[in-house]
Amino acid sequence: MKHAEFTGRLVIVGFGSIGQGVLPLILRHIAIEPSQITVITAEARGHDVAAAYGVRFIEQPITRENYRAVLEPHLGAGDFLLNLSVDVSSVALVEFAGERGALYLDTCIEPWAGGYTDPSLTPSQRSNYAFRESALKLKAARPGGPTAVLTHGANPGLVSHFVKEALLQIAEATGLRTAMPKGRAEWAALARDLGVRVIHVAERDTQVADRPKLPGEFVNTWSIEGFVSEGSQPAELGWGTHERHFPADGRRHENGCGAAIYLERPGAGTRVRTWTPLEGPFHGFLVTHNEAISIADYYTVENGHGIEYRPTVHYAYHPCDDAVLSLHELAGKNWHLQERRRLMMDEITTGMDELGVLLMGHARGAYWYGSRLTVEEARRLVPYNNATSLQVTVAVLAGMVWAIENPRAGIVEADEMDHVRIMAICRPYLGEVTGVFSDWTPLVGRGVLFPESVDVDCPWQFKNFRVL
């Protein structure tokens, strides 16, 4: 089924696991010829995949100095710039695409190389909060114009649409029947009226390979460089209005929307308690993601006196077990990346990615809603994918279709898009999409072996955020 027709040129910058995995989806669901597509990437990896589909492949790193000269011959009015790279400034490419009259989509807001770990920058300056604010400044300066979709992979991206579906299902289950909210204010009011205090992006990847991780090797089921970069940034989370205890190493930003805080420690070194239906309770890494900020911001309710309501939002990620071992070794080396790196793909033998949103504090306690996709089904559905990558690549496809259908929307985030349209495109590729209610809280089982001081008198029965 073709979801959209596209007559312009498509330039894909970066061609790692996500670029290779999304190409067959693009050719399957967008009416576009391989001759219209050009891949520009920093390394030879993926050349065989591009060749298999008859797509032009250019091995050329994109830098601060050359990006305009490299991209100008390939991008003009009515074209599409799909940015799946690392170490290439998203803001620079958004601005450039807008100048050229081209559509744009990325999966995260990237800085130029070194921007995640530059020691001359403060933790606040190298946070996702700061990167998002720089993109929002561009949005304010350029209202309307060619559509540029920011951060639309699985998470950030798809999970924002999960949140809307979850809110509607909680409303139905609790008797708060409501028409489909229209716009940001009505969605935020629904979350407030339901009593949602906390939203975890709760993910457990159980994929395993027939080759175990070796000493001195970093192994992961998706971009290693991307994961290490975001894991090295400060842990970040949207900070809710119900919170009564501020983390000892928590810090507020001095400018911007004020929807989030950061901790003075790397996200890949910070664990939080969370829950998914199949895994049950587990420790996830509080890795910074754009959705932790954008969702908290989008669901903020203001009154004439200030902020009335805002949920606490953060990512809680348990990657595949070999990636956890890789992180343990990385931290022991003071966050210096291992020399050997291996992206798990063909060697994966079994497992799934259980990715969803966990909404807590409402009348039914907790509700997890999301995707359970096995590696076997991912391979059956689309070549060059595993369970983790397909949840990303189908969201990229859906964001591209939405941009083609809405070509003059300006700069947008996932929270501002039509979740019904996005989910209609994604659902066939997400395995089992389901919602599960639970009475789990982060305090279940606490204080059994050792006494703990817990906030048991909290109005909704538990203090939600606890750094381990």
Image: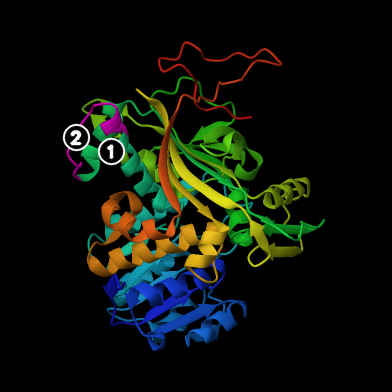
- What residue would you read off at disc 1? 168
Mark 2–mark 1 distance (CA, rounded to whole Å): 8 Å
As drawn, 10 above or below 115: below
Judge whether 26 appears above or below 187 on screen. Answer: below
| Relative horizontal placement of residue 446, taking residue 29 as reference (left or right) | right
Instruction: Tell me the residue at 34%/53% (across/down).
Output: 414
> In terms of sequence position, does the residue under pointer 2 or pointer 1 come before the other?
1
Q: Position of residue 70 (x, y in %)?
A: 47, 82
Q: Quadrant of the N terminus?
A: bottom left
Taking depth in this image into account, of 241 and 30 the one nearest to the observer is 30
The quarter of the picture where the C terminus appears is: top right
Q: Is residue 143 above or below residue 194?
A: below
178 in the magenta segment: yes
Disc on res. 18:
none
In percent of width and height, residue 287 lies at 56, 45
Residue 256 in view:
no
Please determine whether, in this image, residue 125 is positioned above or below residue 49.
above
Spot occupied by residue 399 in the image (x, y as percentages of width and height): 35, 62
Q: Residue furthest right?
A: 215
Q: Nearer the viewer, residue 83 or 222?
A: 222
Q: Is residue 111 left or right of residue 210?
A: left
Three-letter amino acid code of the residue under disc 1: Leu
Q: Residue sitting at 52 percent across and 37 percent down?
A: 276
Predominant secondary structure, magenta span: loop
Q: Which residues are magenta?
A: 170-182
- Give the numbered dot on residue 178: 2
Secondary structure category for the residue under label 2 = loop
Number of other residues with Cα within 10 Å of mark 1, as a class: few under 14, some 14 to 19, many 20 or more:
many
